[in-house]
Image (cartoon, rainbow, N blue to C red):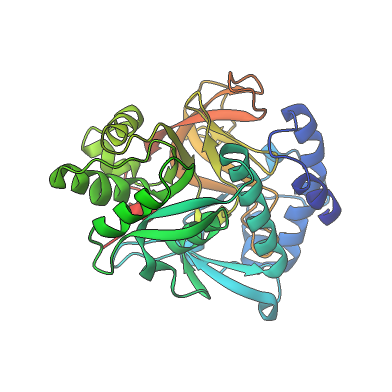
Amino acid sequence: MMDSIVSILNRSPYSISSQEKDAIYEDIFFNLTNHHYSNCPQYRRILDTLGYDTKKTHTIDDIPPIPVRLFKEYELVSVDRSKVVKTMMSSGTSGQKVSKIFLDSETASRQTKALAKITSEFIGKKRLPMLVIDTKEVVKDRNLFSARGAGILGFSLHGFDVTYALDKEMNLDIEAIEAFSTKHKDKDILIFGFTYMIWELFYKELVKLNKKLGLDKGILIHGGGWKKLAAEEVDNSTFKKNLQNVCGIQRVHNYYGMVEQTGSIFMECEAGYLHSSAYSDVKMRRHGDFSVCDIGEVGLIELISIIPSSYPGHIILSEDTGEIVGIDDCQCGRTGSYFKIHGRIKKAEIRGCSDTFS
């Protein structure tokens, strides 16, 4: 199993057709599921309750996904606690429970490698000057990562001269931003942040200050917080257009992912769709019976990843809805399933990284 996972991680993220991936995944996920069944008591009880037979060969569609909310209720671990080297925590507003994700060195290494390879496909392999639309305070605890901190540090591997756009009080540090912009004028730069924070604390403040930045060669990667923006009637197109007006940024890539499957992000392509990579996949499940939706049918988003072996996060059911638009035939030329998000299910907690700054 591990040899197969390593083999896929050594390939470029959009080099495997869905047909080839399905054939490889069948063996990987049969073995991953049995590994978690044997080593995580809570996961074993779930599968036993559902009547899942680990001795039979199953397709991925037959393996029950774990609702993402269970990671808030239980500490799900599939390795000896002595092997846990890092604990990642989801973001949560005051009073909310947070997910705890336990990583051993192998899982953490795979996360880093997958994230690096996917990101490089969109920004190139060369490290770029980096502007982070956040405060440095969020990355200080390197042992107990928040989702925000993990995201910043993960993408920072692609940057140098990392500059934070917000101060300790979450106010815009316009002097630092302008100095960074001047220093790296006419260079490609990487800009990273969480969607709602970029809109609320960066874009709106620049408008208020009547400031225009020369970030025409910037590549913005952002994710999370769309629920709050939807309340302001700000969609993806509006977000991009308004940022371009104040910063000149033309290359913008939204991404979809969560701390429960760090590294397995789904990046937005030039055609505006989110893409699965060789290291992950996505399916939609019907609300009524959790059967797999057809292409173009809206359902609950199931996220599939080859990365987690230290906790049973290989197949999880999110609280978001979406639809698969197509497979292997996106106009951007990348292989894999490509899809779009419709929103959070009703009564789900606000849990995105950028929803929780305060």
Is 63 rendered above or below residue 355? above
Q: Quadrant of residue 341?
A: top left
Q: Quarter of the image holding residue 63?
A: top right
In the image, residue 349 sits, relative to residue 43, either above or below, namely above
The image position of residue 89, as x and y in percent, is 47, 66
Asked whether residue 283 is in view, the answer is: yes
Residue visible at 65% across and 38% down in the picture: 277
- Picture coordinates of residue 147, whole percent (x, y): 46, 60
The quadrant holding residue 321 is top left
Residue 291 locus on image (x, y percent): 58, 33
Q: Relative to 270, is 351 on the left or the right? A: left
> In the orientation shown, which residue stands out farthest toward the bottom?
82
For this rendering, which residue is in front, 32 or 11? Answer: 11
Count of labels in the image: 0
- In this view of the protein, can residue 351 be seen by the observer? no
- Depth check: 206 or 18 in front? 206
Residue located farthest toward the right when viewing the structure as drawn = 3
Task: Say left or right for 294 vs 83.
Answer: left
- Vertical placement of residue 321 versus 76, above or below: above
Relative to residue 209, is residue 295 depicted above or below? above
Residue 263 percent coordinates (x, y): 60, 52
Instruction: Pick the quarter of the image with the C terminus.
Output: bottom left
Query: Residue 233 versus residue 117: which sits nearer the camera?
Result: 117
